[in-house]
Image: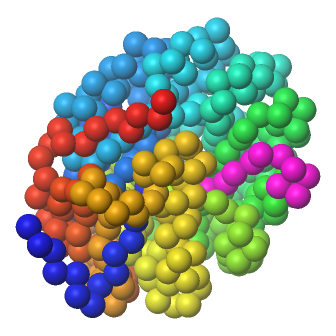
Amino acid sequence: RVLDAEGNVLVPGIVDCHIHNREPGLEYKEDWESATRAAAAGGVTTVVGMPNTDPVIDRPEHLELKFERGEASAHVDFQSYAVVTSENLDLIPAIDETGALGFKIFLGSTVGDVPPPNDGEILEAMERIGKTGKRLGFHEENGEIIDHYTKRFTAEGRNEPIDHSHSRPVIAEREAVERMITFAEETDAKIHMFHVSSGSAAEAVARGKDRGVDVTAETTPHYLWFTEDVMREKGNVARVQPPIRDAEERATLWDVGIDQDTIDCIATDHAPHTPAEKKVDDPFGNTWDAISGFVGLETEVPAMLTFVDQGRLTLEEWVRRHSTRPAQVWGMYPQKGSLQVGTDADFTIVDPDREWTLADRTELHSKNCVTPFEGETFTGKAIATVVRGDIVAEDGAVVGESGYGTRVDID
Ligand code: NCD
Ligand code: ZN
Ligand code: ZN
């Protein structure tokens, strides 16, 4: 097969190190097959699954199950994190041996039943993970601060989607980032901040890097694209944790995060939920029990290419953060994140000039496709996705086989 790439741009395969593929256990939302189908269609050649599944990925057997399911049905290559709780510190070496890409701690309450470890346990986890050579990433929000504001706002009878967002304020994120950086400074751990949403948190990461801490950071297209006004326009559909911030925080995220190069990685935080869970029929009602998260695998490349078209960053700066750096941060480079010339390369061909609108979310390939990007217009699209030399998607249609995707072996 010969691909006609004339007028288009060939880049190393896009690597998304933050997706919720929901398998095992939450297949009514998404599974490996549907998540990686969306990845292929969106131009993404490698994905890394989050551990807040059912069961949670907190021991070798659960990780093995997650890998087996992926081998059976994935369209693109994949990996998985394991979660650290107060209950599984002893299992860290065995989880490492089983081949987890890295570890994750959820500091605040999030989707799924994963209670955060206490500070002593976090320090212990950093020391133990340090011995494995792997990196520990954080859902970087302080749950006690969130609880405080949530109680206050509900007592005041507030019930707007924007209130729900403000109950997870920037201080909850900034404080968590600063504290984990201090812990890493003490333990010499390699740490990572997932889904940095605010300029204030990006500034905290920059201060940590200046102090010589091995802290890397990620942001998502939605924090760079939207401001909290999207909550007023689209309601709970746009609810996500951490929440989408105000214009000033977004401006600082661009300035410190992207222009000053504090943010290492772009990822989606692809987090599918059913339309009912997302309250699409009543997006401004019952704010306090609306669920957080939305899909992103098919809008991340278009959103970033739109920023390139707007001159917000260069094509090279985008590719570095969406392919090379994520692969390096998580130990997959140069297997992933590089254009090795040969027959087994991963690459994505993009049309940087294609203008299109996501008119209807059902055009997307996930099982559940609710996203605030519905209705948005992009300049740029992936037109071919190639994993280890085989075309897995062409012009938005998935042409590869389920089960072709394989676990990225990092040892
Ligand atoms: C994620 C989910 O649905 O699993 N939701 C979200 O709003 N980001 C959880 C998470 O990433 O913390
Ligand atoms: Zn999270
Ligand atoms: Zn997430």
Query: Residue 41 at x, y = what percent?
Result: 24, 62
Query: Residue 312 at x, y = what percent?
Result: 59, 85
Q: Which residues are magenta?
A: 209-218
Residue placed most toward the observer, 179 or 186: 186
Examine the structure image and report whether residue 213 is included in the region drawn in magenta. yes
Residue in the picture at 36% in, 19% down: 64
Residue placed most toward the observer, 25 or 267: 267
Give the quadrant of the N terminus: bottom left
Examine the structure image and report whether residue 381 is included in the region drawn in magenta. no
Relative to 127, residue 74 above or below? below
Query: Residue 303 at x, y = what percent?
Result: 44, 75
Q: Is residue 14 left or right of residue 95?
A: left
Q: Is residue 209 left or right of residue 107?
A: right
Q: Locate residue 106: give its quadrant.
A: top right
Residue in the picture at 36% in, 41% down: 78
Q: Does residue 71 appear anywhere in the picture?
A: yes
Residue in the picture at 66% in, 14% down: 89
Extreme residue in the top direction: 90
Extreme residue in the left direction: 1
Residue in the picture at 77% in, 34% down: 189
Relative to 252, residue 389 above or below? above
Query: Residue 127 at x, y = what percent?
Result: 77, 22
Q: Does residue 147 appear anywhere in the picture?
A: no
